[in-house]
Amino acid sequence: MLATRIRRWKSVALATTAVLVGITAPTLTASPAAATTTAYDSTYYKNAVGKTGTSLKSSLHTIISANVSKISYSAVWNALKVTDQDPNNSSNVILLYSGVSRSKSLNGGDVGDWNREHVWAKSHGDFGEVTGPGTDLHHLRPADVTVNSIRGNKDFDNGGSTVSGGGGSLTDSDSFEPRDADKGDVARMILYMAVRYDGGDGFADLEPNEKVNNGSNPYIGKLSVLKQWNDEDPPSAFEEKRNQTIYDTYQHNRNPFIDHPEWVEAIW
């Protein structure tokens, strides 16, 4: 069952009045993600509800790390055909960054194919394709081979030039900006990884920071931008269904920031 979500967004005055009187309207920014309730608050999240800061982060780490089923990297191919299935065409998957619907059969490494994108880049933590962070479906998504190559292991930030075939994504020498419809997804995947992998399981302690060009360090930036994207692009029905499928069918853990996007601000 999908979580029942209640959101309260601030209402803001539109620029119409300002235009009529010849005044330049101020730039509007997204309100912080509002408090939510889910069907899992009294069960799965019961030890996290009501907490903030490091206490919340620690509780969530324990919750999402317990009794997790792991899959091999080769098994990720078929899993993504289920988790990212196009709701309007069961023969296709929806590609991250570009938003393109592409045949499930076109998985591979050639131009025109889709492959397995590690949203938390493999080199940012040196976990490669190992079972665990290298195969965690909560940050693995199908992406166009060429667009995936352009993103590479760049950090996330605003700005840059248009990515060809990227659905409105932008890039420069040290950062990548997804199209608007994927910004919140990317933020919540990155922050899931930061909570799930804290250095206690033999892998690097993954953390977001305020830098780009992190290279091979176990960090990804920019945290302030990721928080903004989380607020601007709330979880969609597609993202929520994906979270549920991973929980029910594959790993049996959840991305808490899809269920409770306001927990991003509560921790960071």
Image (cartoon, helix red, strand yellow):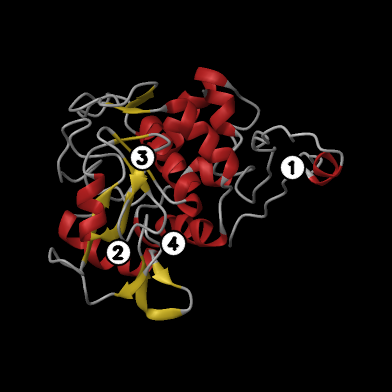
- Viewer-nearest of labels 1 and 3? 3
Query: Which residue, given by chain and number where applicable, does mark 4 sit on?
Result: 245
Q: Quadrant of residue 165?
A: bottom left
Q: Is residue 181 visible?
A: yes
Q: Residue 9, which numbered label?
A: 1
Q: Quadrant of residue 160?
A: top left
Q: Earlier in the sequence, mark 1 or mark 3?
A: 1
Q: CA distance from mark 1 to mark 2?
A: 34 Å
Q: Is residue 71 left or right of residue 251?
A: left
**Amino acid type at image mark 3:** Gly
In depth, the one of 121 and 240 nearer the eye is 121
| In the image, residue 139 above or below residue 25 | below
**Amino acid type at image mark 1:** Trp
Q: Earlier in the sequence, mark 1 or mark 2?
A: 1
Q: Is residue 254 visible?
A: no
Q: CA distance from mark 3 to mark 4?
A: 34 Å
Residue sitting at the far top: 54
Q: Residue 79, which numbered label?
A: 2
User: How packed is label 4: few (under 14 Cα within 10 Å), some, or many (20 or more)?
Assistant: many
Do residues under tags 1 and 3 come within 8 Å of each other at their CB atoms?
no
Q: CA distance from mark 2 to mark 4?
A: 10 Å
**Amino acid type at image mark 4:** Thr
Q: CA distance from mark 1 to mark 3?
A: 30 Å
Query: Which residue, given by chain and number where applicable, does mark 3 sit on?
Result: 160
